[in-house]
Image: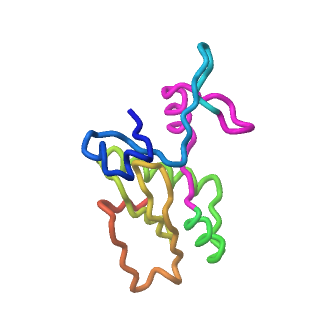
Amino acid sequence: MLCCSRHLKEGKHLNNHHIYFPQQPVQAIQPGQSTVKNSPGKTPAASFDKILQQEMNSGLKFSRHARQRMQSRNIELDSHELERLHSGVNKAREKGSRDSLILMDNLALVVSVKNNTVITAVDGENLRENVFTNIDSAVIV
C-alpha cells in the first residue's frame, strides 16, 4: 500500500509499514500487458540451466585488472599455456579451493576458482618479495 505525501508530511502512517515512493507514479497495467522490459538490443533471458552450462563450458575469463597487468608486463599465453592454466584451475577446484595461486614456469596467476576468473598475473621480474593474500591454495603446473 502506498502512502500519499500529505500523510507522510503530517506524520501519519509512518509506522504502518507503508512504502512511500515520491518520484514513481503508479500506472495501471492492462490485462495481458507485460511488466518486464528488456533493454534495447537484448534478447529475452535464457533459462538458468542454459546460462549455467555456457558459463561452465566457456573456459577461463580474465578480469580487467588481469588483462591490464598482462598487457603492461608483456605476458602472453599460447594455447598450450592456457591449457596448463585451465588444468591447474581444475585441480584446485577438485580440492575444493576458491581462490588459488597458479605457478607456471616464470609466471604466477591468482585465480578465482569459483568464478573461473584470472584475477591478476605476475611475471618473473615482479615475483620477488611479493606476498599473495586471500588465497586458499597454490598449484604448480
Residue 100 belongs to magenta span: no
Relative to the observer, which residue lies in front, 107 or 61? Answer: 61
Q: The N terminus appears in which quarter of the rendering?
A: top left
Q: Residue furthest top?
A: 31
Q: Residue at x 57, y 25 (%)?
A: 28
Seen in the picture, residue 47 relative to 120 is either above or below; the reply is above
- Direction from residue 45 to residue 6 in the image, left or right: left
Indicate the quadrant where residue 72 lies: bottom right
Relative to the observer, which residue lies in front, 119 or 43? Answer: 43
Residue 46 belongs to magenta span: yes
- Numbered disc total: 0
Q: Residue at x 42, y 55 (%)?
A: 112
Q: Residue furthest left?
A: 15
Indicate the quadrant where residue 130 lies: bottom left
Residue 129: x and y in percent read: 39, 86
Residue 32: x and y in percent read: 61, 14
Seen in the picture, residue 16 relative to 83 is either above or below; the reply is above
Q: Residue at x 34, y 71 (%)?
A: 133
Q: Residue furthest bottom?
A: 129
Residue 107: x and y in percent read: 51, 70
Residue 29: x and y in percent read: 58, 22
Colour pattern of the rendering: rainbow
Q: The C terminus appears in which quarter of the rendering?
A: bottom left
Seen in the picture, residue 16 relative to 76 is either above or below; the reply is above
Q: Which residues are magenta?
A: 38-63
Seen in the picture, residue 42 relative to 114 is either above or below; the reply is above
- Direction from residue 101 to residue 80 in the image, left or right: right
